[in-house]
Amino acid sequence: MPISITLPEASKDSSADPTLPLSVRADIEELKEKLIAAGESIEDAFSLKASAALCGRAADWVAARGLDEVDCVSAQTLVARQAALAVLLRAVIFDAQTDEMLTRETAENAFRAAAAAGESVAWCVLDDIAWLADAAELEPVLAARHKLTVSTAPSADLGELYAAIMPSDARQVLSQFRTPQWVGRAIQTWAAGNGDTMLDMGIGPGALSTPIQSTWHQFDEPREVIGVDRSPLAALLGETALTLTNQAHTTVVTDVRELTREKLPGEPDVVVCNPPYAGHSRIPEPEKTQWNQLAEQQTGYDISKFSPLYAYVMFHAETLLPDGGRAAFLTPESFFGTEYGTAVKRFLNERADIKSFIRLDPDGASVFPAADTTAVITVVEFDSTPDKESATQFITVTDPTFTAVRAVMDSTGSDDRDWGRTNTVPQSSLDPNRNWQAQFDPVEVDTDHLLELSDLGTAWSIPPVGEDDPFHVIDADVAAYEISRQHLTRFVRRPSDVLGYVVRDRDQGVTRDGDGDGWIVDPVPSIEIPDTPDAFVKQYDAGTLTGSDAGNEHSGLFRYLRDRIRDGDLQGTETQSDDRCWYRRTGHNPAPILVNNATQNKHRFTVNDAAARTANSFYGVELAVTGAARKAVLAYLNSTVMRDISREYGYMRSGTLWKISLTKLEQLPVIDPAALPDATVHDLAAAFDTLRDTDRDSNSHDEIITTIDTLVHHAIEEMRPD
């Protein structure tokens, strides 16, 4: 049984993390060794004894969890380790619930009986696999239960143990990331207030719902925890943690999608959830379509089929709570600025009082080391008639401690604290069509009277590099085939290859990358080439192709194309109706302006004087205005003011990388040079002329940008209606 000790009351105003007077942690390394050893025995027994039916069930288990996609460890080994863990968990629960002696001879029958009686998670395929091994080989695992029963932090220990026996690749297949203990404790103590019944959707090891310690009463505890998970093993982990902390609970093994209020074993008052971060491409069919249809039925909205799993879980959670029910979701913040996120923001704005969004951003790094995302806690109270004038807080936490996050969840006002910064806005001011990430660090620039970029020009995506590999050549290819320079276009792979604000034809260094892909084969428009690869080869081999004779300016190009056809690289590409040919890279003509679509600083609008081709790390832009007006717009687009404004349109990844979609790029607010005085247009144009001749690393760069910022602020005010 868990150790029972009366602990002193701790101050709720304490600025330090709660330090337990008694802290006992399990020896994870020792438990790992025992589980891996037992897993080897189980794997051997499975190979010798498993029936065809059990092999089929095991295969279904593997496929449903993507374990066959893991390269570093075989799926059979991973399943065997999970089976060993299931034995350990059942032993811990049995020990905590009964006074009966547990021996290797009685363990299997005892566990089966407890599962059949509903005293533990139902028997599953892992159990059948585990008990193929001899009881003697499982005895070390049974004996190890005492290492866990004395733990004062069972949820943290169980999460660490699972991570120890399952490689990160196996856990990331389904985008499952462990909740940091300091985050889980903060959410648990917030949700546990008022003696409510808590629903933990996707309970796992219970990081969001397990009390800090069963005998420590600094914070209120929930009346009951309902833990739900589709995985029997995950449900066993949660049940073990809740049992060891003496928390009243019910564990349900089911798909969250199948849950309704009527099917729940209790009436929850609050939901907590750290759903898998799986993107739409990781949700298999028909499950993806079923989730999408369910969400549209529940919300009445058009829901993007590109929505990730966590968005569907947020929609569904509302249906499981009464009016006034509270919820805290730990998710990526990417929904603030993506297309699919518009429906999520509309849902929250129309169906809930949004209390706060808490960005967990310690030093700009993800709290999930293996996840390329910034995490945010969404705290809401679902309400059929939400108070739109209520305040919503956008909070950035830079201090990764329990005390900081717990204080944040109860904070009010807008100010900077030791743990981070807060911006408070009326919920009514939140537009679902705008990027809410910008509210964490708001920009005090009114742009409602400006045009959109699409009013002054067009923008387009550039195809991925890999689509047209035959057209990418390195200097060695150019020399070997003696391809004439007139048939080559410069290639820019990365924005970092461009040092300033213009790509020039003479810039040898900035259009080369580590792979040496410095050119695109781009035959001059006047050249005569047969309409199909087959016709080209036939004429070339017959010597009837004009320009193929040695010494001709086109001969090197023709030899290169012939070899690529014979290699199969250019077969099957016919002349296109829009004048794109099999011998020329598909897509738009070279973009006159290049925009990097991801950045750690700002999106640069670079003039492409070299007519260079680029990789898909850029968007292409063409402005309808020319001359000084074009330069004035480019000065505005490259200003720090534009960088700050664009935060409302892009979205952030991993705390530092800003990305922007093509749709949002077209919506960027821009000045209208036709509505500005000639003198202002002239000054902006002159400033851009100076900027385009300046490298970003030069000493004068920042001074020029400062000048442009001043002019841009002035231009924005000059455009403001009286």
Image (tube, helix red, strand yellow):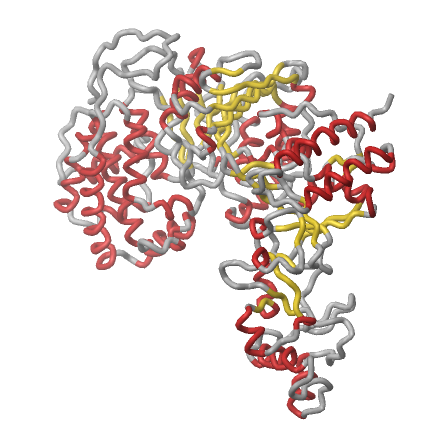
Q: Residue at x 48, y 17 (%)?
A: 408
Quadrant position of residue 135: top left
Q: Position of residue 470 (x, y in %)?
A: 59, 70
Question: Can I make out residue 434 in this image?
Answer: no
Total numbered circles: 0
In the displayed structure, does residue 249 sit left or right of residue 684? left
Quadrant position of residue 565: bottom right
Q: Position of residue 325 (x, y in %)?
A: 54, 18
For the residue pair 389 and 555, the one nearer the viewer reads as 555
Residue 24, compared with residue 286, is above or below; it is above
Q: Residue at x 64, y 44 (%)?
A: 694
Position of the N terminus by quadrant: top left
Quadrant position of residue 33: top left
In the displayed structure, does residue 392 sit left or right of residue 547? left
Q: Position of residue 238 (x, y in %)?
A: 34, 30
Q: Position of residue 118 (x, y in %)?
A: 32, 31
For the residue pair 218 and 624, the one nearer the viewer reads as 624
For the residue pair 673 and 119, the one nearer the viewer reads as 673
Position of the C terminus by quadrant: top right
